[in-house]
Image: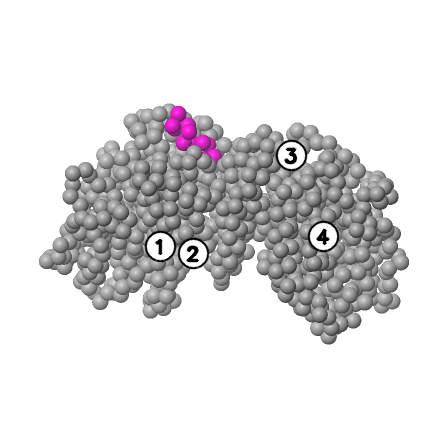
Amino acid sequence: MAEHKNMKEYHGQIQEALDDKFLRATLDKFAVDYKANRARIFEGWDVPELVNDVANIKDNAAQHMMELFEQFKAEAEKRGVHVHLAATGEEANRIIARIAKDNNCKTIIKSKSMTAEEIHLNPALEKEGFRVVETDLGEWIIQNRNEGPSHMVMPAIHLSRYQVADLFSEITKKQQDREDIQKMVKVARKELRAEYVNADMGISGANFAVAEAGVVGTVTNEGNLRLVTTLPRVHVILAGLEKLIPTVADALRCIQVLPRNATAQAITSYVTWIAGANECEVGPDGKKEMHIVFLDNGRSKIVQDPAFKDILRCVRCGACANVCPVYRLIGGHKMGYVYIGAVGLALTYLYHGADKARSLVQNCIGCEACKNVCSAGIDLPRITREIRSRLIKDEGNNAAGGVMSMVMKDRSRFHNLLKFVKFSQAPLTTKGGRFIRHLPEILTGGDQTFRQLPALAPKSFRQLFKSVVKNPSNPKFTVAIFSGCAQDFIYPEQLVAGVRVLNKLGVAVEFPEKQSCCGLPLEMMGQREASLEVSSQNVNGIEPGKYNAIITLCSSCAGHLKHAYPELLKGTPDEYRTKIFASKVMNFTDFIYKNFDLKPEDFKPTTDKVCYHSPCHLRNAGIVDEPRELLKMAATYTPAVEEDTCCGFGGTFSIKFPELAAEIGRKKIENGEASGADVMITDCPGCVMQLRGVATAKDSALKVEHMAELLARTMK
Amino acid sequence: MTQDQLVEVLRKKAPAVPASLYEAKDFEDALQYAVDVTEKKRHCEMLMPVAGETYGPESENGFPTLTERFIAAPGLSDEEFAALEAKAAGTDINLLRSGLRSHLGGFDTSITWADALVTDSVTCIVNSNREEVRLGSMIAEVSIMLVKKSTLLNRLEDANTIMLDLLTRGGASYTAMITGPSRTADIERVGALGVHGPLELHIVLLED
């Protein structure tokens, strides 16, 4: 549970996590295992179809939230259940404490509920004098350590067997075996049995509250829920309003995804469906005293907000943490408040407020791994960007954001500033003027010594273009180049190589000069106003109808132009034009691979060994095999491990969180070195900046190049 | 899918769950299987030992064990239970049909009828409206599920009809989908069985 007053304190907490060797090793292994296990369990399934179904089911449910509540209430009341609706967490806590008091309960046992964590139910009940015992093994462990969960599904993943054994020795007052996990689990089995038997009240959560039958469905592995809901005479279910769902069939469909995505299981050991006050020998009249408390806590307001409503689709599988490169480094205690992972950043803001979320929402690279793995297809990075922009709207701009916004809105001002920097950077450069010397932290916003940052190129691509382009007289295609800032001003040689390759293949290339920054860096900083302005400038600065394609060599620009623009410019005068513009945007490598049927004989023989770094925004667009097919023809491709993970750049992310960017970048370079490759090829100048910067700083022999440079060198 | 194909899927998928699959010749054979399994296992651990009581040798986990053996079968009909009594006669097994709240420290085995089984995920669907049925299938160290071949289903979505039926028959409903024993991976992601409930799950397949 990350609580911090400011960024400085947050950085301190991050460093603590980075120094935790056990945590690092555990999460590294988990990240790799999860991907492989998930792929195996979804074999033979149409995953996009499943995800789409879950999204539709949950969207429909959210739209009819209060109708479903009324339907559920009527059905449940018919079967002797008391149904409550709490507007806030405090109210839910009060209701549950009152139920406990009215029924003369003293000891309460719980099965796992993130919603209970959300409202801090345990401390609220303990304050009222009740004894509360968690029964999920992980939850029981962290309760006894006075900690919050560090993962939504595996709450104690941050702890070693030795820490657990020592805790159990303390609880049982008997030295426990410090190696044997099987025996530790049996300690919990024994210690908790009497707790179930002696408890007066059981509290459980809900995965689904099915309106058509007034039934609550819960997905568990341990079976503790069955004892929690069977043995005590009083049973309270706590459910967020977003758990309401119309039908059992809907719930069964969602269950096809939830356990597969959460723990790579086809189904959990138990799925328990409870409708009504069931038989209970020790209850009044032989039945349970049963209550269901629905929690609003902002949910009914979120459903009205188009920018945030998708968050209510979340089925709490935790997958967004499992694939997150930041979670992998620092774990859930530092990447969430109560809710964890990418969805945790958003839910912290929405359920626990801006104070708790201000620093946390900055800690997203924007790699979009979470979006691609989400059970319900939630565009979590978009929501994170939206929160950043709302924070600025509500609280005013910071100095850096304000300057950036002002400069970027005006293309000529931006370009003049770059010219000024270019002429004045000479004393600061090193290694033949290609890199900037390490600068004081005050100028770079943090310790950037993990990588050697590039200097601005002597001539920008826009200055070079006319002298480089050699358009064929009868072109097969005519394309516009969208340069993006990094290649225009830092790495023009990548674009020059790209133009040469395109010309060689019979493509006419134009460079529309009115184009500006794509706007993604502004979005990442929450600068929505300036971002909309540059988006509009680009859409109007390139005439999409003139070109077969708008080609970019920057995967991040491509992703933003193609996928974010239509959403951002929706409802503006540019909406229609943007759709056509976006449909023409294509990544360079994808364009080359799909249009030219290249063969190995089209390339010169070479002994170059290459590995690949797959840029997040290219991979997210589904372009995965195409670059590798080109590599196999153009050189000797020796794949590195984890080519498909983020490089750690994330634009301003690597400035704000250099300690994280450094760790991710180093790992990538080490993987590249271990592959035996001479060169790591990639498709994004941002990735080149990060990876070449890290490789140079650590004096690695591994070179980093853009795909266009390799193709220009090797194509006959 | 034909019934034979569904059985084939079950045979293939049960071991990974893990669930032991026994294809019984008839009901008598199913009960004999339950008796045999109970006789072969070590005596049940006593999870709530009472001071002054006599217990058997310590289990592998260092807990006291019961000196007697128990099978709980609260969901069997009078006739079925009588057949079980006949099978258990001459063994040291005690049979429980009710009053399981007096045995919450543990018993060896439970026998429970499943209403259906989804073969794709090896998931038993069990009407657990009766508290004794719930306790039987959770407190026993070995949970034996009796499944009729005619109730085999292919995929989870095919369970919609039976689920709706079980959940909306009127009155309260407690319906369990059970796939293997009680499990956890909460310590270092190492899989462990029997964290709260059964250590083993056995599926006994019966002709109708």
The local secondary structure at tag 3 comes to: helix
Numbered tag placed on residue B179 in the rendering = 1
* Amino acid found under the numbered disc labelled 2: Ala
Q: Is residue A468 visible?
A: yes
Q: Are marks 2 and 1 in contact (CB under 8 Å)?
A: yes
Task: Look at the image and tell me in which quarter the C terminus of chain B lies.
Answer: bottom left
User: Mark 1 belongs to which amino acid?
Assistant: Thr
Confirm whether circles 1 and 4 share one chain.
Answer: no
Relative horizontal placement of residue B97, taking residue A288 as reference (left or right): left
Task: Work out which residue is located at the far bottom of the displayed protein and give it.
Answer: A601
Question: For the residues marked 4 and 3, what is the alpha-carbon distance in whole angstroms?
Answer: 38 Å
| Labels 4 and 3: the sequence-earlier one | 3
Q: Residue placed farthest to the right in the image?
A: A467
- Extreme left residue here? B90
**Distance CA(mark 2)–CA(mark 1):** 10 Å
Residue A235: where, in percent of width, then height?
Answer: 33, 36
Residue under pointer 3: A390
| Numbered range of the magenta stretch | A117-127
Left or right of A256 on screen, residue B99:
left
Q: Residues within 10 Å of mark 1 (few under 14, many from 20)?
A: many
Alpha carbons under labels 3 and 1: distance apart: 45 Å
The residue beneath circle 4 is A696
Tell me: residue B25, above or below residue A69: below
Disc 2 designates what residue? Answer: A266
**At x 61% / y 40%, what residue is drawn?**
A363
